[in-house]
Amino acid sequence: MALAPLLALTLGFGTPVAAAAPRCAQASVEVALPSGTPLLDWSENLVYDAQGNLWVARLYRNEVQRYDAAGALTARVPVEAPGAPRFGPDGLLYVNSGDSLAGSGGAGSVVRFDPAAPNPETFATGLTMPNGAAFDAEGYLYVAAGSGVVRIRRDGSIDRDWTDRAVHSGVNGIVVQGDALLVSANGGPLGQILRIPIADPGAASVVAQIPSPVPGVGDFADDMILDAAGTLTVTTISGQLVRVDPRTGATCTILRGEPMTSAAARPDRPGELLVGTESGNILRIHLPEA
């Protein structure tokens, strides 16, 4: 995501883009955790743990921070240029590392640690700018990297055959929906949502196009979250929060604000999301009824 503004400028002009989405019910927003230092506190990604703590990847601070339910900072874990933090089936927190130019050329990795005693250890290596991440029901970890989607086995080795069939440029966010992955891709045009069958990664298809607020200029689709009803909520660098029905491709922009990077659902509040931003603010989003 750190290169998103550059990509938006270099890839957006002259590419096919979707028309503006129809007007729909709007979300409301407030700042839940203000940025200490704008941009330096860039909140690249975030996730809740089972205890209600929020873990935030601070890209330019090279650390993952833990906040308790009251918003107090309770831990700082060193991780170089952290991307998505995601909890694995073993209860450990897995964090992409090298989500920057420093992670190009296969220098990126995935680290993991016990959230109760955070001491990062390397889990997987050889990744190029790893960004989004998601686990499937069998414990495979899928990473959206500069080379495409990478599938990592439970022992940390890369499934090369699968990965070689999932080469897509500009992938960013990733979630698992049943037997498929939903992935945001910005390799041209910007703002596509792809479906990649897990059993046949070479058979990817476009299921939706994120609308652009500016005619003729695409919007960079960053991370996304999938709710229990199967609806995606996608963050974009123009500051849109877009609902997507991956079954029909229908889109609906529910919020326009500052550039947003990622979203996390509160386990105890289904109508609320916390959203990361490029400024470093963590936003509390009150969702409209679907």
Image (spheres, grey):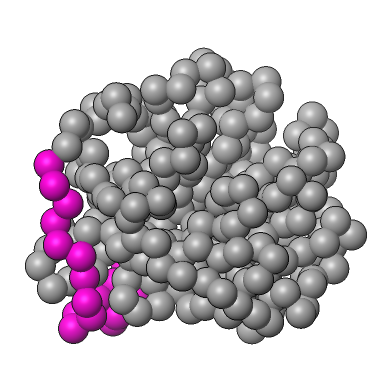
| 17 in magenta | yes
> Left or right: where does residue 129 sit relative to residue 272?
right
Could one spot residue 222 in this view of the protein?
Answer: yes
| 9 in magenta | yes
Examine the residues drawn in magenta and state their main secondary structure. loop
> Left or right: where does residue 41 sit relative to residue 56?
left
* Horizontal and vertical percent position of residue 93: 73, 42
* Horizontal and vertical percent position of residue 96: 65, 58
**Chain part drawn in magenta:** 1-23
> Residue at the spot x=72%, y=56% of the render?
141
> Left or right: where does residue 43 sit relative to residue 20?
right
> Residue at the spot x=66%, y=45% of the render?
86
Find the residue positioned furthest to the right.
155
Could one spot residue 61 in this view of the protein?
Answer: no
* Horizontal and vertical percent position of residue 227: 48, 36
Residue situated in front as seen by the camera: 230 or 43: 230
> Residue at the spot x=31%, y=30% of the render?
290
Residue situated in front as seen by the camera: 140 or 85: 140
Q: Is residue 113 above or below residue 219?
A: above
Instruction: Please tell me in which quadrant of the rendered image residue 253 appears.
Output: top left
Find the residue positioned furthest to the front.
248
Picture quarter with the N terminus = bottom left
Q: Is residue 257 above or below residue 6?
A: above
> Residue at the spot x=17%, y=52% of the render?
21
